[in-house]
Amino acid sequence: MTVLASSDAAAVRPDGQVARPVVRCRGVAKLFSNGTLALQNVDLDVGRHQFVSLLGPSGCGKSTLLRLIAGLGEASAGTIDWPDAQHDVSGVALPRLSFVFQEPTLMPWASAIRNVMLPLKLAGTPAEEARARAAEALRMVGLAAFENAYPRELSGGMKMRVSIARALVTRPEVLLMDEPFAALDEITRFKLNNDLLELWHASNFTVVFVTHSVFESVFLSQRIVTMAARPGRVIADMDVSAPYPRAVDYRTSPLYNAHCKRASEALERAMGHAIEAH
């Protein structure tokens, strides 16, 4: 596995912005119909092949921003651009992305491999090719022996692995992950953190990862973007200057502790900056 320092993956300017982002958010706001201002004036660049975590307290708009980036909702103001994505005839960007939700959201009546095949089936991929690619994705997440298992036969961590395999089977350029490990026990969570980093290195995609865990964000990320609530907005953009691969020794190192301290201070500021929306 190639060892990359965080500065090798993308050209990050001193202001935290990326010279040539894969996705660019400018002045993004989201006002819900009930009057809740979930996001206001959010600027964010994510570089190609970066691993970026969105960190913040509950209600700060992390998941809302991720869904807007995914196209699962429309911003009330501002723009979300994909500079290098292909566009359809009307000029709409067609980014290659996948989304991993907080829950695995598997079809209980379908085997693991058929759950993973679903995006390819919907895209009209021939069945033989879809099955081969799904089997490959399950091998990537360590579930080659569980192709024919049903969700009820899998542990929580294994279900999430199937969900990740389903996201990877389309070979995305950008993987969006909304607190995928929050409900798992600590041992399983650590294991999946390690496995996710290995997949990221092997497949060379971009990751935007929502979490409320300082420790998880520092272990995984090249950048930690901290958000404050009411309304949601970016208040800090922190570089995590630790080389990859990262293993158990990193979790106990002085460098890890120093980054956790900085991220905790940013999170504390975020909680102190919460204001009531008008």
Image: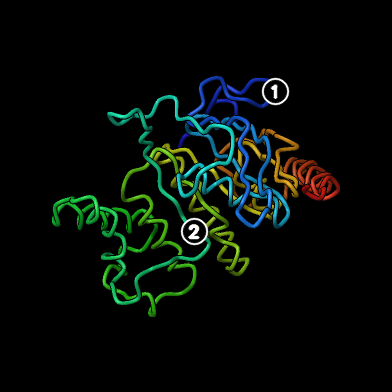
Taking depth in this image into account, of 99 and 153 the one nearest to the observer is 99
Taking depth in this image into account, of 38 and 212 the one nearest to the observer is 38
The structure residue drawn at horizontal position 59% and vertical position 59%, both measured from the top left corner, is 190
**Residue 245 image offset from top left, x and y in percent:** 55, 41
Residue furthest toward the right?
Answer: 272
The structure residue drawn at horizontal position 23% and vertical position 50%, both measured from the top left corner, is 123
Which image quadrant for residue 150?
Answer: bottom left
- Left or right: 228 as drawn, with respect to 156: right
Amino acid type of the residue that numbered disc 1 sits on in the rendered structure? Asp
Q: Which residue is mark 1?
A: 15
Amino acid type of the residue that numbered disc 2 sits on in the rendered structure? Phe
The disc placed on residue 102 is none
Q: Callout 2 environment at 10 Å: few (<14), some (14 to 19), or many (20+)?
A: some
Up the image or down, 73 lies above or below 43; here it is below
Which image quadrant for residue 259?
Answer: top right
The disc placed on residue 101 is 2
Taking depth in this image into account, of 86 and 17 the one nearest to the observer is 86
Residue contact between numbered discs 1 and 2, judged by CB atoms under 8 Å: no
Give the quadrant of the N terminus: top left
The structure residue drawn at horizontal position 14% and vertical position 57%, both measured from the top left corner, is 127
